[in-house]
Amino acid sequence: MSAHPVVKMGASGAPLSLYHLLDPEVLANPYPLFQRLRTEDPVHWDPFLHAWVVTRYQDVVTVLHRYSAERTPTPEQLTQMGLGSMNPIAQVMVKQMLFLDPPAHTRLRSLASYAFTPQRVEVLRGHIREITNRLLDDVLSQGRMDVIADLAEPLPCIVTAEMLGVPVEDHQQLKAWSQDFAEMLGNFQHNPDREPRILKSVQEMTAYFRAAMRDQRL
């Protein structure tokens, strides 16, 4: 890969980028954008995300198999880039399974796998169905529902909270923290005014789970 990536331009003169998914019209039908990425620039430097976007299956497999999680910026690297204020986030990221290589990744994955054995998944299936029915019952009397707000968003949050062993009533807060963290992963460079909120969310989330772990050990 070139040290100085060439920015590919679209037919309209706008850079080819996943950033266009923020446009409601593009999001409603993103497949032409995906097709252009695959055919015109399958290993694409996205100028807005400041990241490489790989869209062909074999290339994705190659990246997953060969590239190291060590490419995740460390606090020291962020400081060198003039982004030292983001160090609290980097300190969290470098400890997450997604951003670790073996053997640390293998150890954490092995621990997490106990929650997803066939027997456990079968138990979860029935319980998730119960939660789904309860969420539907909650809106039944209204005669209408917002599928995203009333079902698609709360369902995985509730299930995740239960699996983590934290109070289910905290699921909305967990969702808010995860959204802030996801925004940081995607495009924090383009929303510098959001940095204080993202930092606050990461600090609050870290403190929350540390307290939860202490409680579970008692």
Image: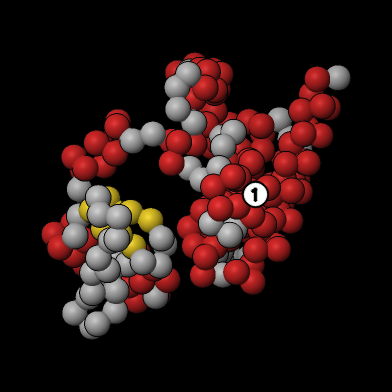
User: Which residue is at 48% across, 18% downward?
Assistant: 103
User: Which of 164/84 is in front?
Assistant: 84
Secondary structure state at the residue bearing disc 1: helix
User: Can residue 31 be seen here?
Assistant: no
Q: Residue furthest left?
A: 39
Q: Position of residue 31 (x, y in %)?
A: 24, 63
Q: Position of residue 158 (x, y in %)?
A: 64, 42
- Give the labeled residue for mark 1: 87
Q: Is residue 7 above or below residue 107?
A: below
User: Which residue is at 39% across, 75% downward?
Assistant: 23
User: Which of 174/66 is in front?
Assistant: 66
Labels in figure, total: 1
Q: Is residue 218 above or below residue 14?
A: above
User: Can residue 217 be seen here?
Assistant: yes
Question: Is residue 160 left or right of 197 when viewed as pictured?
Answer: left
Crowding around mark 1 (Cα neighbors within 10 Å: few <14, some 14 to 19, many 20+) is some
Amino acid type, callout 1 = Asn
Residue 161's quadrant in the figure? top right
User: Which residue is at 80% across, 20% downward?
Assistant: 217
User: Which residue is at 20% across, 55% downward?
Assistant: 42
User: Which of 88/147 is in front?
Assistant: 88
Q: Is residue 34 above or below residue 92?
A: below
- Colour scheme of this structure image? secondary structure
Q: Position of residue 39 (x, y in %)?
A: 13, 59
Question: Is residue 101 left or right of 193 when viewed as pictured?
Answer: left
